[in-house]
Image: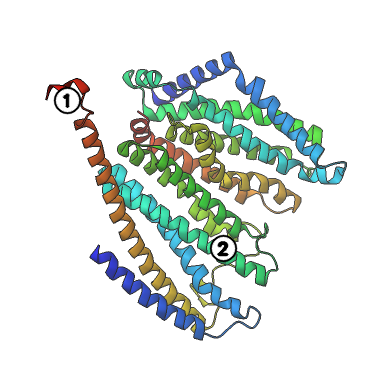
């Protein structure tokens, strides 16, 4: 079985488990939308401030809640399940790729709904032609966050303080993604080029991909 | 231990000379006495970058060689790097309060990204504390030590990427943008702080080796010694 097929199979199983449990859709997404509403209420009746703050609030909530979605797959990984995948001869790199793929798909859906909710609730003024650049930055940041959270989840698997520690690892490391994604819209506002920010996001994703695949074997050893 | 004492003595002498140069160098007209902050701010942040780079190197080498020495190097360097980074950010804030009129400015990308970088390595140190098994701890923290270093180029290039208050490097390929006396004092202090870093690193690695030896002795005693049963004592 090729690496790609193994990865797709792992992603399929992860998504199947998620569709049965449904925590991302039933708990984390509504909670994130409530957080958006709390932010808009906290700004009071200053509609201009609410509109200006919208994209920034979106990224704050998308990152903080998104990492919880991406970390969920590693949280469900039990010791017997890890032993089983190892005994089946599964490539450790396929586990990283598959887990990142499933987390990316879940995060992609989550971020799309959250972005639509932000547009509705905050009514921000967006520059003309914003759709494709913003969509590209959303996709790239989703992939980066998914890979980073997968790595953090693997590093902290089985630890007593796993939930809080994984968040502490992801939150500061996600800064290149936050900077790249938020600057795309700002660059459009200033009518300057967005290429450098897309390049920053792509480079971060590539570095994480290389790190994740390259370190997958020691990761598997360390997590047992 | 003797090597650490010698290194600390050399560091103290170099820092003394660096302080002398810092206090005799001319002052910038606008910054006044705060010009001297550069002699702590630049060396400590340079060493934070170096220390985190050494952590990444130690992590890579641990995964290749699997010897505890490399793990001790990575961990000790991260601890010292956090210390230097905190000092560097603090001195930057003191300088910012005096020159920019505020200690923390969100317009300064370098300041914000450096502060975030500290948290990456705080997470690294917390991860180490969370794992009791030395081998598991070494492997997992080596992985994080490698991933964490991606933050370092972002901090360095932040002044070019984002509109920021922070100035770009003063020492460039086409020459320095500061008077020679200030530059010499700063470079001597960079050297002095580097010797201090090597001394602290050597000392911390020595202590880490003693800690791991004590931990392994404790484990051996724990396996060999058990509480005597009352019935056995009465028989004797």
Q: Nearer the viewer, mark 2 or mark 1?
A: 1
Mark 2 vs 1, N-terminal side? 2
User: Which residue reaches farthest front?
Assistant: B234
Label 1 near label 2: C-beta < 8 Å?
no
From where the camera sits, is residue B155 visible?
yes
Q: Quadrant of residue A36?
A: top right
Measured Cα–Cα span from mark 2 to mark 1: 62 Å
Residue position for label 2: B90
Q: Nearer the viewer, residue B29 or A146?
A: B29
A171 sits left or right of B83 in the view: right
How many numbered discs sit on the rendered protein? 2
Residue A136 spot, x, y in % from top left: 64, 38
Give residue A114's mark: none
Q: Give x and y (percent) for residue A104.
A: 56, 30
Q: Chain of mark 1?
A: B
**For the C terminus of chain B, which image quadrant?**
top left
Q: Chain of mark 2?
A: B
- Residue most extreme to the top: A20
Q: Is residue A129 above or below residue A13?
A: below
Q: Whole-percent x and y of residue A194?
A: 66, 49
Q: Residue at x 76, y 35 (%)?
A: A38
The N terminus of chain B is located in which quarter?
A: bottom left
Q: Tell me the residue that label 1 is attached to.
A: B233
Q: Is residue A140 above or below residue B191?
A: above
Q: Between A43 and A209, which is closer to the camera in this rendering? A: A43
């Amino acid at each position: 079985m090729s690496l790609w097929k193994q990865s797709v199979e792992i992603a399929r199983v992860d998504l199947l488990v998620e569709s049965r449990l449904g925590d991302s859709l039933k708990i984390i997404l509504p909670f994130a939308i409530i957080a958006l509403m709390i932010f808009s209420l906290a700004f009071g009746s200053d509609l201009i401030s609410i509109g200006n703050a919208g994209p920034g609030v979106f990224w704050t909530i998308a990152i903080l809640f998104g990492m919880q979605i991406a970390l969920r797959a590693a949280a469900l990984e039990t010791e017997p399940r890890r032993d089983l995948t190892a005994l089946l001869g599964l490539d450790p790199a396929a586990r990283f790729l598959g887990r990142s793929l499933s987390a990316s798909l879940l995060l992609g859906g989550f971020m799309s709904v959250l972005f639509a909710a932000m547009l509705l609730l905050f009514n921000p003024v967006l520059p003309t032609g914003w759709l494709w650049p913003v969509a590209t930055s959303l996709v790239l940041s989703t992939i980066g966050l998914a890979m980073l959270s997968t790595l953090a989840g693997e590093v902290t698997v089985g630890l007593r303080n796993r939930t809080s520690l994984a968040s502490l690892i992801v939150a500061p490391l996600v800064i290149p993604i936050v900077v790249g994604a938020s600057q795309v819209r700002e660059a459009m506002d200033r009518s300057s080029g967005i290429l450098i920010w897309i390049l920053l996001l792509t480079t971060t994703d590539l570095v994480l991909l290389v790190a994740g695949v390259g370190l997958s074997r020691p990761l598997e050893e360390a997590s047992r | 231990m003797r090597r650490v004492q010698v290194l600390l003595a050399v560091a103290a002498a170099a820092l003394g000379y660096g302080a002398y140069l810092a206090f005799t160098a001319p002052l910038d007209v606008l910054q006044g006495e705060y010009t001297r902050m550069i002699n702590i701010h630049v060396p400590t942040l340079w060493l934070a970058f170096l220390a985190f780079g050494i952590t990444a190197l130690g992590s890579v080498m641990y995964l290749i060689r699997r010897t505890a020495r490399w793990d001790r190097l990575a961990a000790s360097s991260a601890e010292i790097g956090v210390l230097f980074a905190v000092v560097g950010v603090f001195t930057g804030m003191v300088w910012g309060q005096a020159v920019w009129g505020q200690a923390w400015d969100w317009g300064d990308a370098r300041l914000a990204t450096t502060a975030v970088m500290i948290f990456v390595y705080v997470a690294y140190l917390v991860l180490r504390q969370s794992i009791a098994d030395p081998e598991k701890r070494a492997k997992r923290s080596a992985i994080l030590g490698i991933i964490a270093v991606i933050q370092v180029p972002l901090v360095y290039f932040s002044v070019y990427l984002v509109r920021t208050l922070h100035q770009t490097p003063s020492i460039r390929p086409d020459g320095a943008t500061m008077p020679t006396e200030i530059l010499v004092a700063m470079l001597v202090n960079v050297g002095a702080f580097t010797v201090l870093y090597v001394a602290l690193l050597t000392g911390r690695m020595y202590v880490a080796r003693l800690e791991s030896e004590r931990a392994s002795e404790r484990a051996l005693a724990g396996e060999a010694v058990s509480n005597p049963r009352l019935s056995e004592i009465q028989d004797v």
